[in-house]
Image: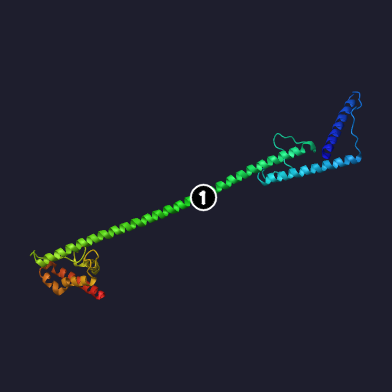
Amino acid sequence: MERSSTIFAISSHFYDSSYNRGHYHRAAAGTPAVPNSRKRHAATPAYTWVVEQELAALSREISETRRWVFEQQVHFGLLPKGTGTSTPRMRTGEKRRRGPDPAFAGRELDEEMAWLRERLRAAQRDAERSQLQEEFDRMEARWRREGRRQRRQECHRAGEQRGREERQNEAAAERRRQAEAWKAYERQWAAIAIGKDDSPLTFRSVPWPMSLPPKSAREVTSEAVAKFILSHAHSEGVSRKDRIKSALRRWHPDRFGRILNRVDVKDRAAVERAVGTVARCLNDLLARVN
């Protein structure tokens, strides 16, 4: 209540001073001066000094508050940096008043603080939205990386699966070829043993222990003979040693001599060289097994 009385008194004092200035101005222009009939408030020098001190303190408080509000606006990005360190301008639609106006200072400060709080809340909402968007972007990027990694793994597994299937199919096809070649090999040897055909034998008509029949003696190799004799596609349950011994009974040079006499003369030398290669291969295999 004391502050309100002081403000009222000062406002009346200012009003009277303004009225007197206008009155004497008209007198100077030629209009007869009329004595001021309004009763003026008496003010002692001490009372005037106290009021001036209170107004100065209030002005400093408002100035400091405005400066703090300005600094917060700059800090939170509501005003661009480098705007200056002076007290910020009022918002659009508000007039800057000359000198302290205690009657409206409190209300203006409340409005300024309410406006600042709303701007701060808006800035916080924007910051939260920005943070959520950044988190979403990180999660999306992580999801995409994980998706790419999973797709690479799936492609790799699919490739490995295809490779295994192809190898299995090739192995199965090779076993079938080996089995068919072994059956043909045994049929031909059975026919030779029975002697159904009295026509001379040639190099190609001799049943060689190989999956693919050779065309010359150079194509008869130890690797091809060993692969054919020891293949898992035939003779199931027969040991390696028994397989080798059974083959030697056919391909030993002394035993093959009676078959060699049935070979055409022009192929006899090539057949004899190839038989020697087969016999040496079988002897080496038997030595390793023993």
Q: In the drawing, does residue 25 fall left or right of residue 273?
A: right
The answer to which of 78 and 225 lies nearer the viewer is 78
Location of residue 219 by image quarter: bottom left
Whole-percent x and y of residue 13? 86, 34
Q: Residue at x 13, y 65 (%)?
A: 190
Q: Compared with residue 121, is residue 198 higher up or lower down, i.e. above or below? A: below
Quadrant of the rendering where the N terminus is positioned: top right
Residue 47, how many percent across, how many down?
A: 89, 40
Please name whichever residue, 257 or 95, is drawn nearer the observer in this view of the structure.
Answer: 95
- Residue 181 in the image, given as x and y percentages of width and height: 20, 62
Of all residues, the one furthest to the front in this rendering is 1
State whether residue 198 is above or below residue 123.
below
Q: Is residue 98 visible?
A: no
**Going by the image, does 26 lie left or right of 206?**
right
Q: Is residue 251 above or below residue 23?
A: below
Q: Residue at x 55, y 49 (%)?
A: 135
Residue 48 falls in which quadrant of the image?
A: top right
Q: Position of residue 211 (x, y in %)?
A: 21, 63
Q: Return the residue found at the far left.
A: 198
Closer-to-camera residue (148/211)? 148
Three-letter amino acid code at the position of disc 1: Met
Give the side of residue 85 with respect to residue 225, left or right. Answer: right
- At label 1, counting other C-alpha atoms closer than 10 Å, the crowd grade (few under 14, some 14-19, many 20 or more) is few
* Left/right of residue 68 with respect to residue 195 in the rendered view: right
Quarter the C terminus occupies: bottom left
Residue 159 visible, this angle: yes
Give SS at disc 1: helix
Count of numbered labels shown in the rendering: 1
Q: Which image quadrant for residue 245?
A: bottom left
Residue that mark 1 sits on = 139
Q: Residue at x 88, y 41 (%)?
A: 49
Instruction: Say if 268 sits above or below 88 in the image.
Output: below
